[in-house]
Amino acid sequence: MRVLVVTAVPVERDAVTRAFGGAEERVALPGAELHRRGAFDVLAGGAGPAAAAAATAFALASGASASAPYGLVVSAGIGGAFTPVTPLGSLVVADGIVAADLGAETADGFLPVTALGFGRDRFTPPPALVREVAAATGAAAGPVLTVSTVTGSAERAGALLAAHPGALAEAMEGFGVAEAAARADVPVLEVRAVSNAVGPRDRDAWRIGDALAALTDAFGKAAPVLEGWNSHEDLEG
C-alpha cells in the first residue's frame, strides 16, 4: 500500500521525508512535486485548506501510484496547540478533523456550515489507526481544528475551545486534505507537531525547529503502522 503525505510547505515535507530510508525519487505534478521514498509520497501542497485540497486531489488523480494505489492520505506538519494539554514539541493525532471557521456569522454568533443545512464540517479518521499511531509515537489524540486565519488572540482561542471542547490543536490544511481524500474514497489521518501555543502571537516563543524534529521522529516511529494499515472497515466521516 502506498501512503500520500501532504504538508503545507517544503520544510515540513523535508522533515517528513527524512524519516524514511532509501533513495528519493521525484515525480512532477501540475504545480508541485512528489518526493517518493519507499511506500511514501510526500507533497508540499501549499498553505490553507483550498491549496491543500487542490494539491491532494491532483496527487490522487495523477496516476503517480498507478501500480500500487494510495491506501491512506496523511495531512502532516507543525501547528499551534491549546496548551498545557499539548505542550510545545509534543505530537497530536487527530481523532476529528474539524473545519472550525466554515459557516456564517449571525447576530447570535457563529453557525457552522452544517447548521445552515448543507455541507459538512468534520471528518473522522479511522479510530483504530488513530490509536495505533498515537501508541507508536506517544502522541495525544483529539480534535484538530482547521482554520483559514491563524488565531492571534486569547479571545479567539477561548471562542474556539468553547465551540470545540477538547480541541488539541489548530492548523490550516487538514480539512482540505480530508475533503479531497474522502471524494477519492481514501482514508485520511492528520498528524501535527506543536510549534506554538494558540493565542496571542509571540514569535520568540515558537519552537519551529523542535516541532520539525518531532515530526521527523513521529514519522520514523509511525512508518510501519502507516504502511501496514490496509483497511477501510472503520472509515467514518
Image: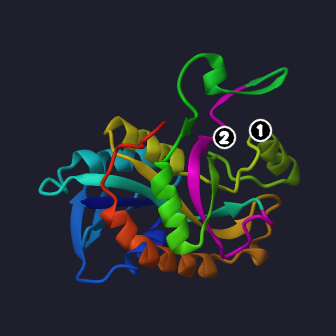
Residue 84, horizontal then vertical, whole percent: 81, 66
Q: Residue furthest top?
A: 117
Q: Residue at x 77, y 77 (%)?
A: 204
Q: Which residue is mark 2?
A: 100
**Within 10 angstroms of label 1, few (less than 14), some, or many (20 or more) residues?**
few
The residue positioned farthest toward the right in the image shown:
155
- Looking at the image, residue 102 lies above or below residue 131: above
**Coloring applied to the structure:** rainbow
- Indicate yes or no whether the magenta region holds residue 98: yes
Q: Nearer the viewer, residue 224 or 193?
A: 224
The range drawn in magenta is 83-104
Mark 2–mark 1 Cα distance, whole angstroms, equals: 8 Å
In the image, what residue occupies the spot 83% across and 60% down?
200
> Helix, strand or loop at disc 1?
helix
Does 225 lie within the magenta span? Answer: no
Q: Mark 1 is on which residue type?
A: Ala
Q: Is residue 42 visible?
A: no
